[in-house]
């Protein structure tokens, strides 16, 4: 049923005087957006409010290729099967947060809700969802959303692998002495210092740099990345690879620019342009960067 025109006017009026313009979606009172421009606007508004399933629906309508929509649905089904449902994403990223890393921290414990322990098999399964981007070639927005959610799920899954008895990924699961690490500044590089890996954690610094996708215009998945992920213990290069994909999805494919999209872009860009450059030489400083950006509950 169509809503009355007065509802449309009311929404436009409210948005015009709202202090939170990014939360306004003028298409909500309508039957639904139909043109590509309206669908893109509605999808981006939904994304910025953490309504990822709704964003996927709008992006999917941009494609007339059933196989591409089917590929995206398959990716969502895989993620849902392993605990990374769209509801889990919305509750993790759909609320206000001072540092965007909090969203990944919130998502990590939800990845154990399927009853399967986090680890090598779950990492590989999530990469299987990521590889669905290979089958989405003509709808970059939809491909970007799949790239984002699967890479974000992978990052949070790695955090979940290193979660202690509390069930929530803590700052102390990331570095040996969180309070001291935060105050070290450039002193974070000390090999045996406060920013070192805590004793007993499976994550390590032994990985070599790699990307989850091929460095081409469409950036399809890289099957060779499977060998990097399919190992007993995770490493921080896996987290960096996930952040590279998140950044590409947001800046090149989704072109998200609201509060959430902009914060995610800034977060991932910092790890590409700053912390990622020191990961091999001073991994302790990379961990400090994660800590400073909200990874780990205190």
Image (cartoon, rainbow, N blue to C red):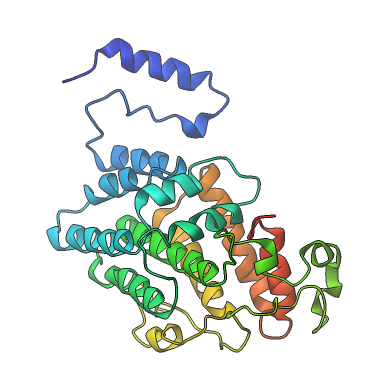
In the depicted view, which residue is nearer to us: 227 or 277?
227
- Residue 72: name its quadrant: bottom left
> In which quadrant will I find the N terminus?
top left
Q: Which residue is drawn at 20% across and 53% down?
A: 63
Residue at screen point 38% across, 84% down: 226
Q: Which residue is drawn at 40% across and 54% down?
A: 254
Relative to 279, 2 lies left or right: left
How many marks the image carries: the answer is: 0
Residue 211, horizontal then vertical, whole percent: 47, 79
Q: Which quadrant is the C terminus positioned in?
A: bottom right
Task: Tell me which corner region of the image, top left, top right, bottom left or bottom right, holds residue 98.
Answer: top right
192 relative position to 110: left or right = right
Q: Position of residue 19 (x, y in %)?
A: 58, 25
Is residue 20 positioned above or below 49 on the image? above
Is 77 or 10 nearer to us in this picture?
77
Q: Where is residue 241 in the image (x, y as percent from the top left)?
A: 51, 75
Apparent side of residue 45 relative to residue 131 in the rendered image (left or right): right
Q: Is residue 248 visible?
A: no
Relative height, residue 55 to residue 82 (above, below): above
Residue farthest toward the top in the current orientation of the protein: 6
Q: Could you say where residue 36 lies in the image, as x and y percent from the top left? A: 26, 43
Instruction: Please report the residue visible at 53 percent of the width from the left and 22 percent of the height from the top.
Output: 18
Taking the image as drawn, is residue 235 in sight? yes
């Amino acid at each position: 049923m169509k809503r009355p025109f007065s509802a449309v006017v009311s929404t436009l009026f409210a948005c015009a005087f709202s202090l939170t313009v990014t939360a306004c979606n003028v298409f909500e009172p309508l039957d639904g957006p139909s043109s590509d421009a309206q669908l893109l606007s509605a999808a981006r508004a939904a994304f910025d409010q953490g309504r990822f399933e709704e964003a996927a629906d709008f992006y999917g309508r941009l494609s007339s290729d059933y196989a591409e929509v089917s590929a995206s649905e398959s990716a969502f089904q895989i993620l849902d099967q392993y605990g990374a449902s769209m509801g889990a994403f919305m509750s993790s990223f759909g609320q206000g947060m001072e540092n965007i890393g909090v969203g990944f921290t919130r998502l990590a414990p939800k990845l154990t809700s399927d009853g399967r322990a986090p680890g090598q098999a779950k990492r590989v399964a999530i990469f299987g969802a990521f590889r669905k981007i290979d089958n989405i070639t003509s709808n970059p927005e939809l491909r970007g959303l799949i790239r984002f959610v699967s890479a974000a799920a992978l990052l949070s899954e790695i955090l979940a692998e290193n979660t202690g008895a509390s069930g929530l990924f803590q700052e102390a699961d990331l570095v040996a002495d969180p309070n001291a690490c935060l105050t070290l500044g450039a002193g974070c590089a000390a090999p045996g210092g406060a920013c070192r890996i805590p004793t007993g954690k499976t994550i390590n610094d032994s990985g070599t740099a790699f990307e989850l996708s091929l460095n081409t215009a469409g950036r399809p998945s890289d099957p060779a990345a499977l060998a990097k992920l399919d190992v007993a213990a995770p490493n921080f290069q896996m987290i960096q690879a996930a952040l590279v994909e998140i950044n590409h999805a947001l800046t090149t494919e989704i072109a998200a620019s609201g509060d959430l999209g902009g914060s995610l872009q800034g977060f991932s860009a910092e790890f590409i342009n700053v912390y990622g450059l020191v990961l091999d030489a001073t991994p302790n400083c990379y961990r400090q960067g994660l800590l400073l950006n909200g990874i780990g509950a205190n």
